[in-house]
Image (spheres, rainbow, N blue to C red):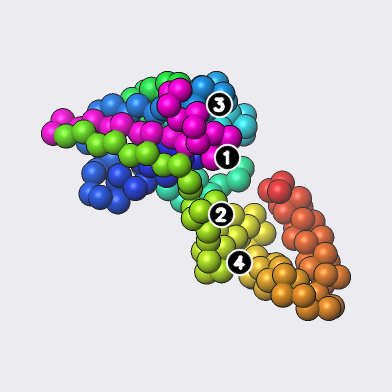
């Protein structure tokens, strides 16, 4: 989400998440309702699409952003309090970037200052592509918690080899995906 990326970039300048008193996210009108909602206990899609929840994770639990199973039964006090500070509004000016990109403008306030950040492209978009190291890091962050470090590394190695066109790799990759899926299902960690 562009709004989450904007918040990360503002935090990287030294603004402490605990100092934020108000956050206003502006997005093109067509996707306002997609992201402007709370979360429902145990409902994965509401957690993944709620901009206020995702921004709270970015502020206080950034590693949780990579949890593909996010669907907690309850939101902790710090996350819930942060979510309450987020307001989302439609901005017709951002339509000039949409639908080619899904931009967001974030305006934040602290007791001492205000910041504004416009993000049109997020890391991983063609305009801000990942290099192989960044792809590998994201792959490991999302798969290792589900299937383990070694199987994740095996899947990554085979996937990169398949992209390089190595001949015998597709069958080995498929077999590794089947093993990883079976292990995830057996441990009640659905992929």
In the image, what residue occupies the spot 38% across and 33% down?
A: 105
In the image, what residue occupies the spot 83% across and 78% down?
A: 167
Pointer 3 with pointer 1, Cβ within 8 A: no
Q: Is residue 62 visible?
A: yes
Q: Marks 3 and 4: which is nearer the front? A: 3
Q: CA distance from mark 3 to mark 1?
A: 13 Å
Out of 5 and 125, give the one closest to the viewer.
125
- Residue denoted by label 1: 100
Q: Marks 3 and 1: which is nearer the front? A: 1
Query: Which mark is first along the chain, 4 or 3?
Result: 3
Query: Which mark is first along the chain, 3 or 2?
Result: 3
Residue 109 left/right relative to 118: left
User: Residue 149 has which mark?
Assistant: 4
Q: CA distance from mark 3 to mark 4?
A: 36 Å
* Element type at mark 4: helix
Q: Is residue 80 visible?
A: no
Residue 107 part of the magenta-drawn span: yes
User: Residue 31 has which mark?
Assistant: 3
Location of residue 33 with respect to 123 vertically, above or below: above
In the image, what residue occupies the spot 50% across and 28% down?
A: 95
Query: Which mark is first along the chain, 2 or 4?
Result: 2
Relative image position of residue 92 (x, y in whole percent): 45, 23
């Amino acid at each position: 989400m562009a709004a989450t990326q904007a918040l990360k970039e503002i935090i990287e300048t030294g603004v402490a998440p605990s100092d934020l008193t108000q956050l206003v996210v502006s997005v093109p009108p067509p996707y306002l309702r997609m992201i402007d909602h709370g979360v429902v206990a145990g409902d994965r899609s509401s957690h993944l699409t709620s901009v206020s929840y995702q921004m709270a994770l970015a502020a206080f639990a950034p590693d949780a952003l990579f949890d593909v199973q996010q669907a907690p039964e309850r939101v902790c006090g710090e996350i819930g309090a942060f979510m309450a500070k987020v307001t989302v509004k439609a901005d017709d000016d951002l339509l000039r970037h949409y639908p080619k990109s899904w931009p967001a403008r974030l305006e934040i306030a602290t007791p001492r200052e205000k910041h504004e950040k416009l993000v049109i492209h997020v890391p991983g978009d063609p305009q801000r592509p990942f290099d192989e190291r960044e792809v590998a890091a994201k792959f490991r962050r999302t798969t290792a918690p589900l299937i383990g470090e070694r199987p994740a590394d095996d899947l990554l190695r085979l996937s990169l080899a398949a992209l390089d066109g190595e001949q015998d790799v597709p069958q080995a990759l498929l077999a590794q995906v089947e093993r990883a899926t079976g292990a995830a299902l057996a441990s009640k960690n659905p992929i």
